[in-house]
Image (cartoon, rainbow, N blue to C red):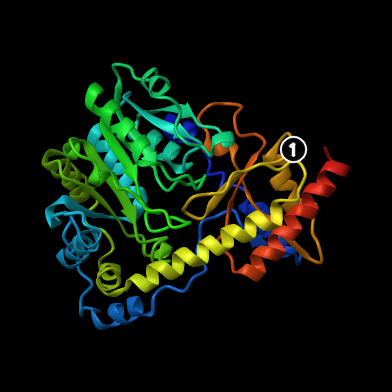
Amino acid sequence: MTAISERCADMQASPIRKLVPLANAAKTRGTSVYHLNIGQPDIPTPEGYWKALKESLPEVLAYGPSQGLLVLREAISTYYSRAGIDIDTDEIIITTGGSEAVYFAFMTTCDVGDEVICFEPFYTNYNGFATMAGINLVPVTTVAENGFHLPSKSEIESKITEKTKAILICTPNNPTGTVLSPEELSTLSDIVQKNDLFLLSDEVYRDFVFDGGSHLSTLELPDIEDRVIVMDSISKRFSSCGARLGNMISRNKTIMEAALKLGQARLCPPTVAQYGAAWIYHHLSEDYYENIRTTYQNRRDLLINELSDVEGIFFLKPEGAFYATIKLPVKDADAFASWMLTDFQLNGETTMVAPAAGFYATPGLGLDLIRIAFVLSDDKMRKALNILKNGIKTYLETVQ
């Protein structure tokens, strides 16, 4: 039989979703599973989203413009203007989720075989998008001991070759919760200017910064306006993952013209959902953003309090997003996460986490790490973490 493409053969299976069959089997056996493996918020989607959808339902669900509905691009422009960032509607293209925005960024900046520098651990699906685009992610390793902040400028620059076209960042970060400082962003700005590179910035979690901190968008960096491409999404900010709406932003007209060609090839992003998204961007008050920040910060603090007394665990306080990458006293976090679903339960319940090796491009790294998404209510988080603690103890005593 003819083999499948090398592209798909080489493509990484998602470490976030690959254990789903084990979770489903556990549920079939009657075991309840707390999902800390995936960034699916449990906060209700704003009611106005549904109202706007119903009020805008057309007689014919027709194709929309390839760059997205003007009403949504205007709403996103207004959203940024409230943050003091001027973005024109023609500097925005609506995408099918933030995923397509990342893929478009790769496709518009790179040719097959080109390289993009990325700081590991990173959002695992970057690997898949890079494979689809035929490019190579070049990892620069960050470490838990300093909260996964950037290494030195010289270490970053040592990875630059004649094939390097861009540097990719995510701040606040998935999977670590790290928020890059203005000084770190300034360093990256210097590097991309000096080496004629693009700066690709995943800012999906820009509204989730804790402890009174603030987010500095790469759109605010001086002198590199034509080098910055921002990828964003309504999935996490508005608890609307299933809407599959994101956006790509750049002040570089050539980049946006190229992205529009990609947009035309896939015709248009989901039409009806854009009306709901436009309502959200226009109408949600600062109270909404403050409430979700407070909710996730409280869940982060609960995570810290519940795991602080577990011997052998190490992680620093996440500064934003709603993830923590945690070092466990196990040799193989993948085996442990699987065991939690196949062999362990506490009062008929177990916990699902994401092994973190899949968030690395360097083989052998992250084997003792897991990512936890603190997206459940306080009561469920507390139960899930108690199960996890008991699971670690039992695993170390009976398996490892």
Q: Please tell me which residue is depicted at 57% across the width and 26% down the height of the picture.
A: 363
48 vs 157, nearest the viewer:
157
Displayed quadrant of residue 64: bottom left
Q: In screen coordinates, is 194 left or right of 396?
A: left
The x and y percentages for residue 327 are 66, 40
Q: Please tell me which residue is depicted at 40% across the width and 42% down the height of the picture.
A: 180
User: Residue reaching furthest right?
Assistant: 398
78 vs 256, nearest the viewer:
78
Up the image or down, 64 lies above or below 130; here it is: below
Q: Please tell me which residue is depicted at 53% across the width and 41% down the height of the picture.
A: 13
The x and y percentages for residue 332 are 71, 36
> In the structure shown, which secondary structural element does the residue marked by tag 1 occupy?
loop
Q: In screen coordinates, is 25 left or right of 166?
A: right
Up the image or down, 128 lies above or below 61; here it is: above
The x and y percentages for residue 87 are 16, 54
Q: Please tell me which residue is depicted at 65% across the width and 34% down the height of the picture.
A: 367
Q: In screen coordinates, is 264 left or right of 16?
A: left
Q: Residues within 10 Å of mark 1 (few under 14, many from 20)?
A: some
Up the image or down, 204 lies above or below 364; here it is: below
Residue for badge 1: 330
User: Residue reaching furthest front?
Assistant: 212
